[in-house]
Image (spheres, helix red, strand yellow):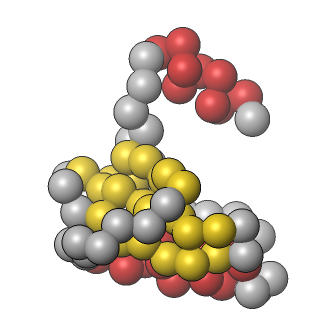
Amino acid sequence: MPQISLNSPVGALTVFAFEDQIVALDWGFVEEVESCAVLDEAQKQLTAYFAGRLHSFDLPLAPDGTDFQNRLAGDV
């Protein structure tokens, strides 16, 4: 599964993709990086967000979870 890690003001983050969609964002750093176009764009957008230049994200999301978990995530 493609994944990238980046340092951020809130700590190390790792973003995971599957079939050109973001499927997870987790705390921590991984050494083995396998990027793809959607992860490159996610890194750009996260960097801009933490720099205060971006206020909303435009990324294809397909979070993993039960229907209940995904409904709760939509309410946040």
Rendering coords of residue 69 (x, y %):
54, 20
Residue at 64% over, 31% down:
74
Tell me: 9 left or right of 8.
Answer: right
Q: Which residue appears farthest toward the right when viewing the image?
A: 52
Quarter occupied by the C terminus:
top right
Residue at 43% over, 17% down:
66
Residue 45 visible within the image? no
Rendering coords of residue 63 (x, y %):
43, 38
Tell me: 31 left or right of 74.
Answer: left
Residue 12 visible within the image? yes
Tell me: 27 left or right of 11.
Answer: left
- Give the vertical position of 51 relative to 76 (above or below): below
Quarter occupied by the N terminus:
bottom left
User: Could you say which is closer to the camera, residue 75 or residue 26?
Assistant: 26
- Give the vertical position of 10 relative to 62 (above or below): below
Q: Which residue appears farthest toward the top when viewing the image?
A: 68
Residue 52: quadrant of the picture: bottom right
User: Could you say which is closer to the camera, residue 51 or residue 74?
Assistant: 51
Residue 48: quadrant of the picture: bottom right
Rendering coords of residue 24 (x, y %):
43, 48
Rendering coords of residue 31 (x, y %):
30, 73
Tell me: 64 left or right of 49.
Answer: left
